[in-house]
Amino acid sequence: MDFIAHIRQSDNNVQTVKDHLIEVKELAEQYGAPMGIKYLCGLAGVLHDFGKYSNAFREYIIQAVHHPDAPPKRGSVDHSTAGAKLLFDLFHKDHIVPEKAIVAEVVGNAIISHHSYLHDFFTPELDSKYLTRVRDKEIPEYDYMVENFFTYVMSERDFHYYVDQATKELLLFIQNEPPESCEKQLMFLTKFIFSTLIDADRTNTRLFEENKHQTSIDHEELFQNYYDRLQDKINSFQHHEKANTPINQLRSSMSEHCDRFAENPSGIYTLSIPTGGGKTLASLRYALKHALLHNKKRIIYVVPFTTIIEQNAEEVRKIVKDNENVLEHHSNIILDEEDNDEHQDGVVTKQQKLKLAKDNWDAPIIFTTMVQFLNVFYAKGSRHIRRLHHLSEAVIVFDEVQKVPVKCISLFNQALNFLKAYGKSSLLLCTATQPALDFVKNKLEINTDAEIVENLDDVVKAFKRVEIIDKATDGGMATSELADFVKEQINQVQNVLVILNTKTVVKTLYQELEHKMDDKVAVYHLSTSMCAAHRNHILHEVRNKLKAKTPVICISTQLIEAGVDISFDCVIRSLAGLDSIAQAAGRCNRHGEKDIQQVYVIDHQEEQLKFLKEIDVGKQITRRILIDMKRDENAHGGNMLSPKAMERYFQELYAELSNDLDYYIPSLNKDMMELLMAPKHESGYVEAYISKHNEQIPLFITNSYRTAAKYFQVIDDHTTSVIVPYREGKDIIIELSGNISMEDLSRCMKRAQYYTVNLYTCELELLMKNDGLVPFFEGKILALEEGAYSKEFGFNIG
């Protein structure tokens, strides 16, 4: 009798449990091998659907397929506990060998969680969800499952040998850490194994459903082609009429140094090329050369805002002359919840289509955001963490790295330290304003002599384009005064960029200037209320105006600061962190087209920053630096944007916000670092349990992975991505309304990323109340109704 893992929707063909377990094991081994954890990952793969070796599951799946109108009771058959229970019974229950018991915990948690998210080993309620599943839960037909597994998949002798190999891998993995403080390594190890399991399971299931085979890419050949095309592009610059100007020669020198530096071993390095220094080309040169020399499988660019993903990705596409293998991942359009979907496994429902859609960062070059990068390590749901193993054997370039949210600093540093020490990845921190990430308690393990740019102070002076004019320390400006000031400037120069701290004041100033300016001056509004396609359309129009030298004013939130390739004659920046002032200055006279131009720093009186603590604290530190410069014009080397000034700014910022760096959770009176990484003897929950019950907890790992994920949000107020009816977004919404295939769904979700906005919970609730949302796939994908999106402002609730 064949035991069934899946039944294909198109032709009712069966994938047996044996085939599925062996194929998932092989894929997971492939994913884990570069990290030296082939057997640990394979163990999760071969056991994850062990529970399908039962008559109950066989009847369940046949009933679900043949009687879709009257399916079996939801969650009536648990098939994800048995594999973890086998590990617990054999290696944890009696006669414990510590290292094998830890294998049982690490791999077992991944197995019981593969239809939701990793469980807490120990919870705030002082119990163990892991033990509840693997020790206490009764599994019908369990002995029958064990017999079938050892008969059809792997003999008992081979299984014990396999576990022995996995145990050796575990010991090698934690060999540099004392046993009493290796929880951090075990947390990352568990998440990595979980990632390989989720991706292997879903990839194998998708390939079976689509009746296809796994294809592979020759990364070395591909990166060599890309590198050759990049070199052709660089060589073409030598024939440019301005090739021998001092600035272009300096750009060329920094690019050459990136090429040579790529020969160094993988590590964490900094690239502090000033604005206009050719950072994109230089970092790509490093990444491609390093990938070729050190056998990396992908290059990942992590940017602070979705605004610049398309711009940077398009620039790289043009250089490498390849559209297919450059992936842009803006945001998660499909809502990913931690609800258990085990009851849907084996049958392709609408929910299964969403789960199986290819969404795993399996591409040679990827552009994504800092939010998505941090979500991979720490957010709830399986869609994010599925991508984690693809961050190994990679070159990861963090563009404008200073934009890491302060509360995520420790978590960010630990993730990078893990990728450096265990993931065989090389990390490049790119920005003209390097944050002091090695200054904090949970510091970043940056390599010694990490800076790629030589003689950095001299380079910064050579690239000076602007003069900072302090109009902030003598008093504030209301919107009406600011509008008059903008009007004054536009009478002296052709174009002005105004950057303010909140969407509300951006919109108010835009409306004020719309009334005050005559028709000869074009006024534009930019904010994250617009989808990426809309913002890019506005930026395209603004660039055309700049090129034609017709008067133009652009009012924007800070989204325009980081990396957007645009240049104005005059920039006005509302007082904020020094890094933001520097980034705003990078939008003025960007390519040195003119002599020194002015960047005015003002203090906008009407901005409400009480919920924007980082901006508010950064603003006060910048004010102090401005006052110092006013007293002594030679302070900080006579340049408030110098590396010295920036180092002072970030050290003061992190010192002032030191209580926030570990991601404090007020409702638990705990920080994320304790939940995820605290050694057992330092856990407040373990201490409370021992005090209450006067006994030890029968676990080696006691961290709270699911609780931490539940509270993790890069942006303070939770947001949801919603597709908007802007241009092609309308067609995507129509396509989602039909009966869409899995392959078309993957393609559709990729296109839809340009046509989404992120809405806060309160905005979603108001839209639902006013019938402003269109749900698809039982509410897992959301779209805006026509009336809720404006061509002028983007999302417009009224």
Image: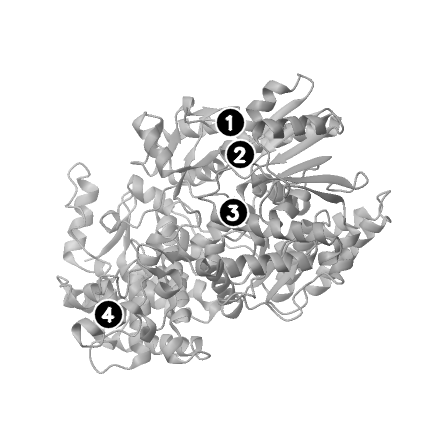
Residue 24: image quadrant is bottom left
How many discs mark residues in the rendered view? 4
Residue 78 % position (x, y)? 19, 56
Say which amino acid is labelled 2.
Answer: Ser
Inter-mark Cα distance, 2 to 1: 8 Å
Badge 4 marks a residue whose secondary structure is helix
Q: Is residue 488 above or below residue 64?
A: above
Tell which residue pokes out farthest to the top in this image: 519
User: Where does label 2 land, which residue?
Assistant: 527
First along the sequence among labels 2 and 3: 2
* Residue 301 visible somewhere in the drawing: no
Residue 101 % position (x, y)? 29, 76
Say which amino acid is labelled 1.
Answer: Phe
Residue 638 % position (x, y)? 75, 54
User: Where does label 3 land, which residue?
Assistant: 616
First along the sequence among labels 1 and 3: 3
Say which amino acid is labelled 3.
Answer: Asp
Residue 703: image quadrant is bottom left
User: Where does label 1 land, which residue?
Assistant: 793
* Residue 44 visible somewhere in the drawing: yes
Asked whether, in this view, residue 491 is left or right of residue 405, the answer is right
Q: Residue at x 28, y 41 (%)?
A: 349
